[in-house]
Image: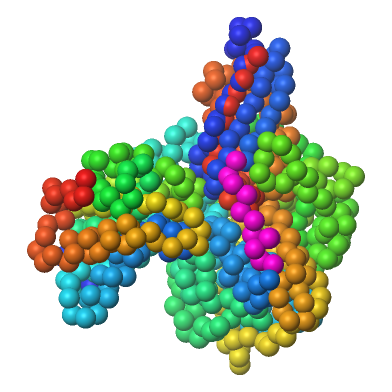
Amino acid sequence: MSDGPARRLVVGVGNPDAGDDAAGRLVARRLRSRRDQGQGEELVVRECSGEPTELMAAWEGFDDVVLVDACSGGGAPGRILRFEAPQLDELDALQSRQRSTHGFGVTMAVALARALGVAPKALVVYAVEGRSFQAGAQVSPEVERAADDLVGLLSTPGRPAASTARPGT
Amino acid sequence: MPTSTSARNRVVSVPALARVEGEGGLEIRLRGGGVADVKLRIYEPPRFFEAFLRGRSFREVPDITARICGICPVAYQMSSIHAMEAACGVSVGGPLRALRRLLYCGEWIESHALHIYLLHAPDFLGYESAVHMAADHAEAVQKALELKKVGNDLVTLVGGREIHPVNVRVGGFYRAPARRELLAIVDRLKRALDLSLETVAFTASLQFPDFERGYEFVALRHPEEYPLNEGRIASTRGLDIPVSAYEDHFIEEHVPHANALHSVRKGHGAYHVGPLARYALNFDRLPKVAQDAARAAGLPPVCRNPFRSIVVRAVELVFACHEALRLIEGYEPPERPFVEVEPREAVGHGASEAPRGLLYHRYTIGADGLVRSAKIVPPTAQNQKTIEGDLWEFIPQVMDLPKEELSLRCEQAVRNYDPCISCATHFLKVALVRE
C-alpha cells in the first residue's frame, strides 16, 4: 500500500444519513479537512459504512488503526468511550442497537480479522454516544462537539494509538 | 429421542434472529407432540418509503429506494428505474443495458458470498458464527472475503461506490466507465469464477436434512438470459404474465404479528421467490459452466429442498462471475451515458431479481414528473408465508431435539431464505413454546 503501513490510519465508521450514526464520518471528514490545510498530514483518513469486509479491506496493510464509531450505551449524548481490543465485547453491547449488515458490526469485523490473523497490531476504537439515529436526522450538537474533541485528540502529533487515556468517561 | 410430556408442550422463542438483515424473531408453539403455531415476527418498525416517495421527482426515486437496503441497493435502483422508464415509454438497450446487468452481477457476487460463507455455512458446520467458524475454516472465510471484495469492487466500478451506488440514473448512468477500467478487474473476476466453482463443491459437501416441499416457484424468465433485470413473471404452476400484471395475480395481506405484509398468489396461496425459484425456472438459461457445476454438485434442474439453496446460491455465484466476464468482454462504451427520459402522466411497473428474489415496484407519476403513488414488494415479504410453511412441516422432523438445538435448526430453516427484514418492513430471534 503506497500510503504506508507505518502511518496511523483513522477510519470513520457509520451512516452519514442517520443522525448521530454519522459521528465517525464527521471526525474523518474534519480530519481530512485539517489535512487539506496542511495539518495532521501523518494520518491516513478513510470512511466506511462499518460493513466488515469493507472495514477489513480499509485497514489492510496498517498496523496502527483507530476506528471512530457511534454507540448507544445509554450514557449522555456526546460522551466519548475508548476501547482497546480486549474490551471489544463491552463495545459490542453498546452497539447492539441497529446492525444493518446481517448482524455484523465493527466488533464482529475485528473478531473475524483476529481469527484470520489479519487484525491490526494496534487497534483502538473511539465510540461516541449518540442521541438519535433516525434516518435523515441532523447530528446532535453534543455529538458535533464530541467530534471536534476527537479531531483535536487524534490530531495531536505523536500521540500513541495505544494510549490509556479515556477521554470524556 | 424420548420426550417428556413437558418437553412435548413447549415454546421455542428466538426473540431476535441473528445473521439476518433487520429485526425479527420467531415464535414456535408445540402442543401434544405437534406444532400448534409458528409465527415469524417482524418487529422492525415500518419504514414508510412508499408514503414519503409521494411528491418526489421520478428522477430521485432510484437513489431514495436504494436506501431501503445496504445489501441489495442495486436491486432497488434497477426495479425503480425500469418502472420509471416503463412509465415514460423509454427502453434502454445496448451498452447501458449491459452495464446495468454488470452492476447487478456485482451485487449478486457480494450478497451471495456473504450469505453462503458468513451467514449460512456456520449453521451447517455447527458454529455459532463466522467468527467461530474462521478458527477451523480460515480458508473458506478468506474465500468469502475475496469474493465479496470482487463484488464490492465491481459495484464501485460501475455504480460509483459499493453501498448505495451513486452513478445510476433513470435512463442510464451519470458516467459510463471506459473499457480499460472494466478490463482492469477481469483477472480478479476470473479468480472469482474459480473460487465460485470451489464454493459449489464446498456447499455440496455439507449435510442437508431430507426435506422437500411442493413449492410454487415464482421468478422472472427471459427468452435468452438467466434473469437479472428483465423478463416475464413465471411460475412452476403455469403463470406467465408481464410485470405490469403482477398485482392482478398477487396480493399483500396484513398479519397481526408482523410489520411486513405477507404476499400470496391470488387463489393459490404462498409461493417461493429467490435462488431456488430462479434456478427451477431458468436452469436452461444458465451458462454451461454453471449447469455443469450444478450437475457435479448433484443438483437436479428443479431443487425443492430449501436447505440446498446454499448450493444453488453457489451456482448463481458461478453464473454472476461468468456473466460479468462475458459482459466486460463485449463492452464498448456508449456514446452518451444515458438516454433522455421525459416524464408523462402514467403508471410504470418494474421487476428485477434481487439476490433474495423478485422485487416488484409500481409508480404512478404525473406529467410534472412527481410521484403520485408508489408500491414496493420486496422478496422477503413474498417469502414470509412460505418460511412459516417450511417451519410447520420441518419442525416435526426435529421437535424432539433439545430446545437449544431445535431453535438453531429453526433459525437455519429461516436463513435458507437469506431474509432481509429491513427490506420487508420496509434480525431474527426464536421463541419456542411447548404447551
Outermost residue to the bottom: B335
Q: Residue at 70% of width from left, 42% of height from top?
A: B384
> What x and y, as percent, mark residue B416?
61, 42
Outermost residue to the left: A158
Residue B234 against residue B16 in the figure, above or below: below
Which range is magenta? B43-54
Name the image colouring: rainbow
Lateral position of residue B291 relative to residue B166, left or right: right
Outermost residue to the front: A141
Q: Residue at 18% of width from left, 51% of height from top?
A: A167
Assess whether residue B45 is covered by the magenta stretch: yes
Which secondary structure class fits the magenta region best?
A: loop
Assess whether residue B221 is covered by the magenta stretch: no
Residue A93 visible in the current orientation: yes
Residue B59 against residue B401 in the figure, above or below: below
Q: Quadrant of the N terminus of chain B?
A: top right
Lateral position of residue A13 relative to residue B180, left or right: left
Pick whichever, B163 or B103, lies toward us: B163
Q: Residue at 20% of width from left, 69% of height from top?
A: A43
Q: Quadrant of the C terminus of chain B?
A: top right
Pick whichever, B165 or A133, lies toward us: A133
Residue B259 against residue B99 in the figure, above or below: above
> What x and y, as percent, mark residue B12?
59, 23
Pick whichever, A7 or A42, lies toward us: A42
Residue B97 against residue B248 in the figure, above or below: below
Residue B279 visible in the current orientation: no
Give the quarter of the image for residue B348. bottom right
Give the quarter of the image for residue A47. bottom left
Q: Residue at 72% of width from left, 71% of height from top?
A: B371
Lateral position of residue B241 relative to residue A110, left or right: right
